[in-house]
Image (cartoon, rainbow, N blue to C red):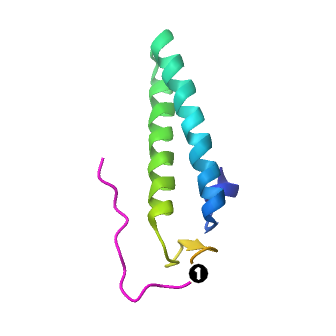
Amino acid sequence: MWDYVGIVRTTKRLERAQHRVKMLRREVEEYYGNFRVTPDLIELRNLIEVADLIVASALKRKESRGLHFTLDYPDVLAEACDTVLVP
């Protein structure tokens, strides 16, 4: 995942990461529904949720600012825009 969502990003790599997160989410949801729930399974589900939020936020950012650098949008916008996601 680090190769797709590391400090230097591209839209294509973020989209690949998003696809992999969706696959992981489906697997965990299937497992969650068919087996006994454990703390490790809940932690895995939470990690997938965080990964999904990170990727979604990075895809919304159309600039490079600070540690958020994307090769597709190398410039800084004149005014910073929030990429805070609302669940």
Q: Position of residue 11 (x, y in %)?
A: 60, 63
Q: Main secondary structure of the magenta part?
A: loop
Q: Is residue 77 magenta?
A: yes
Horizontal placement of 14 versus 41: left or right?
Answer: right
- Give residue 7's position: percent from left, percent from top: 61, 67
How many numbered circles does the render carry? 1
Q: Quadrant of residue 13?
A: bottom right
Residue depicted at x 34% and y 61%: 84
Residue found at the very far bottom of the displayed protein: 78
Question: Tag 1, which secondary structure?
Answer: loop
Front residue of 79/51: it is: 79
Does residue 35 show up?
A: no
Write the residue at 47% across / 32% down: 45
Residue 83 falls within the magenta-colored stretch: yes
Amino acid type, callout 1: Pro
Name, please, the residue furthest toward the left: 86
The residue tagged 1 is 74
Q: x, y (%) of residue 20?
A: 62, 41
Range of the magenta residues?
A: 75-87
Residue 16 vs 78, above or below: the answer is above
Residue in front for this viewpoint, 12 or 53? 12
Give left or right: position of 11 versus 51: right
Whether residue 18 is visible here, answered yes or no, is yes
Going 54% across and 85% down the picture, which residue do you hit? 75
Residue 82 position, x and y percent, is 34, 70
Q: Residues within 10 Å of mark 1 (few under 14, many from 20)?
A: few
Q: Is residue 46 left or right of residue 72?
A: left
Residue 8 against residue 77 in the figure, above or below: above
- Report the residue at 46% width, 14% height from top: 33
In the picture as drawn, the residue positioned furthest to the right comes out as 3
